């Protein structure tokens, strides 16, 4: 099939590369010339495991090309994916400006029968807006569908090749048939629903996962008050098959490009349809406040951060990505600097990106270098390079008195203490030497 993907962010690039791998003729389209040049060179404009290999294979097989030219990209396309960004507006609603611009720009070049599929996360009702823009700008026959994307950064290629489900939001039988054919090589359940249901499903899935994380963080707070241990609590409640013990490890709250934005957008959407008293608002507030609250508690636990030398391990919003959007480090580090701490930080991939966003700190080549003379070591991201450290070697580099703050509960407190640290985790009592 001839496909065009508009937008070369995570979703756009991965979608382009995966469909090209299956032998479709794919054109990736973006208005950013430097991104297009990088992609045509076989490199994604961001770090994502396996993606460059996939891009290079498809470019070599000539099933994939990238361009800034709408006419070239649209005129032969049978299916056009809209995968542009939908940032939150200041009032929390989704800013659909880029979806609207892309729709307007493609309209004059459409051929009869093209399917325009929305992959960007958009509020229910956006398909109608897209349809209206197209009607005003072309006489050609077209169809609008919604194909929400559920990939996770850091495992985007794997997730796209092995989805749990393929959600097709469409009503016309021939559109459903074409989209089913296109997704044939992918595993996962097929779910065929209306475009509005597909859009609600995407927001609801993210909001549900975000609330699951918020819930466990709330329970972790209670554990800290009464001597219970959150990891033991998770073990016990997770054994209930209705609950399960997956996807709710506690920490400093959720970050990244999706959850914070999608929860806010769904809350704003709820408000716009008269449902202002929404659980989503509370989830968002709790998550926003969490880092500040935890930092205050950590500060109290170690006698304040002022004048302390602190090693920060992990800067990206999660492992296996250099994405800094809503990364905990962006709140934690300014807070610590304000308290009068000195910071040395390390991240396996995101240091270049961090340098553009964080001032007044030193960067180290690895965790052991970051730990030199540190009075506090704070693990922010569970990169595998940071969760298997030689604790004795780390201790030998750090200050005599050093507290290890494990915001992802990755280390066995006993082993950390045996190595000579004081241990502070999430949802459990502090363990002292
Ligand atoms: C998420 C959804 O998982 C994905 O389906 C959707 O398409 C986009 O948003 P992503 O943001 O890439 O994906 O990362 P994810 O691994 O889901 O983590 C999101 C945030 O929640 C991170 O800050 C992570 O650290 C945090 N998290 C995740 C937890 O705190 N605990 C968990 O158990 C899981």
Image: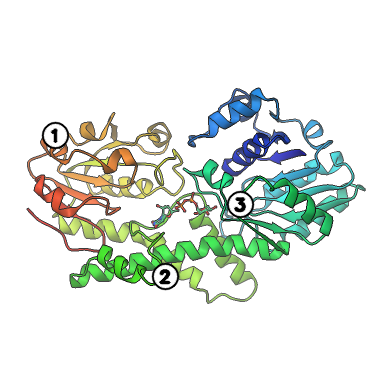
Mark 2 or mark 1, earlier in chain? 2
Residue under numbered circle 2: 243
- What separation in Å lies between label 1 and label 3 (alpha carbons)? 44 Å
Q: Are marks 1 and 3 in contact (CB under 8 Å)?
A: no
Q: Residue at x 51, y 34 (%)?
A: 50
At horizontal 62% and vertical 76% (from top left) the residue drawn is 274
Q: Position of residue 318 (x, y in %)?
A: 40, 46
Q: Is residue 340 left or right of residue 417?
A: right
Q: How many marks?
A: 3
Query: Would you name the residue on which mark 3 appears?
Result: 149
The answer to whether mark 3 is within 8 Å of ligand 1 is yes
Residue 64 falls left or right of residue 57: right
Q: Residues within 10 Å of mark 1 (few under 14, many from 20)?
A: some
Looking at the image, is 391 positioned above or below residue 123? above
Mark 2, Cα crowd under 10 Å, few <14 / some 14-19 / many 20+, is: few
Q: Considering only order in the chain, which callout, 3 or 2, is on the residue closer to the N terminus?
A: 3
The residue wearing badge 1 is: 397
State left or right for residue 171 relative to residue 67: right
Query: In percent of the image, x 31 and y 37: which residue is there?
Result: 385
Residue 286 screen position, x and y as percent: 40, 66
- Is the residue marked 2 within 8 Å of ligand 1, measured from its CB? no
Q: Residue at x 14, y 53 (%)?
A: 414
Q: Horizontally, is 139 left or right of 105 in the view? A: right
Q: Nearer the viewer, residue 201 or 182?
A: 182
């Amino acid at each position: 099939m001839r496909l065009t993907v508009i937008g070369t962010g995570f979703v756009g690039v991965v979608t382009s590369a995966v469909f090209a791998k299956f032998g479709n003729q794919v054109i990736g389209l973006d208005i950013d010339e430097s991104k297009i040049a990088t992609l045509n060179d076989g490199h994604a404009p961001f770090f994502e495991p396996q993606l460059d290999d996939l891009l290079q294979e498809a470019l070599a097989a000539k099933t994939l090309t990238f361009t800034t030219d709408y006419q070239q990209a649209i005129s032969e396309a049978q299916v056009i994916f809209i995968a542009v960004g939908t940032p939150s507006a200041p009032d929390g609603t989704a800013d659909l400006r880029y979806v609207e611009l892309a729709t307007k720009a493609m309209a004059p070049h459409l051929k009869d029968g093209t399917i325009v599929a929305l992959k960007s996360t958009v509020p229910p009702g956006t398909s109608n807006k897209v349809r209206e823009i197209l009607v005003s700008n072309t006489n050609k026959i077209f169809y609008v569908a919604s194909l929400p994307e559920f990939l996770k950064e850091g495992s985007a290629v794997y997730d796209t090749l092995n989805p749990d489900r393929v959600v097709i939001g469409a009503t016309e039988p021939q559109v459903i048939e074409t989209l089913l054919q296109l997704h044939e090589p992918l595993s996962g359940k097929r779910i065929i629903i209306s475009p509005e249901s597909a859009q609600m499903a995407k927001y609801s899935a993210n909001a549900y996962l975000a609330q699951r994380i918020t819930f466990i963080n709330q329970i972790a707070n209670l554990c800290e008050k009464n001597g219970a241990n959150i990891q033991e609590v998770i073990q016990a409640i997770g054994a209930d098959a209705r609950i399960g013990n997956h996807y709710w490890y506690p920490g400093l709250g959720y970050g990244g490009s999706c959850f914070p934005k999608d929860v806010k957008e769904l809350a704003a959407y709820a408000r716009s349809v008269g449902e202002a008293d929404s659980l989503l608002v509370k989830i968002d507030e709790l998550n926003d406040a969490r880092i500040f609250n935890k930092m205050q508690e950590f500060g109290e636990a170690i006698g304040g951060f002022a004048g302390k030398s602190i090693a920060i391990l992990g800067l990206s919003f999660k492992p296996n990505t250099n994405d800094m959007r809503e990364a905990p480090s962006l709140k934690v580090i300014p807070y610590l600097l304000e308290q009068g701490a000195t910071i040395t930080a390390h991240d396996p991939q995101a240091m270049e990106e961090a340098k553009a966003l964080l001032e007044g700190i030193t960067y180290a080549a690895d965790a052991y270098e970051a730990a030199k003379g540190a009075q506090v070591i704070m693990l922010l991201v569970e990169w595998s390079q940071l969760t298997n450290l030689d604790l004795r070697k780390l201790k030998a580099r750090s200050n005599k008195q050093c507290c290890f703050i494990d915001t992802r509960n990755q280390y066995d407190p006993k082993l950390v203490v045996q190595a000579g640290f004081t241990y502070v985790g999430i949802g459990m009592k502090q363990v002292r030497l």
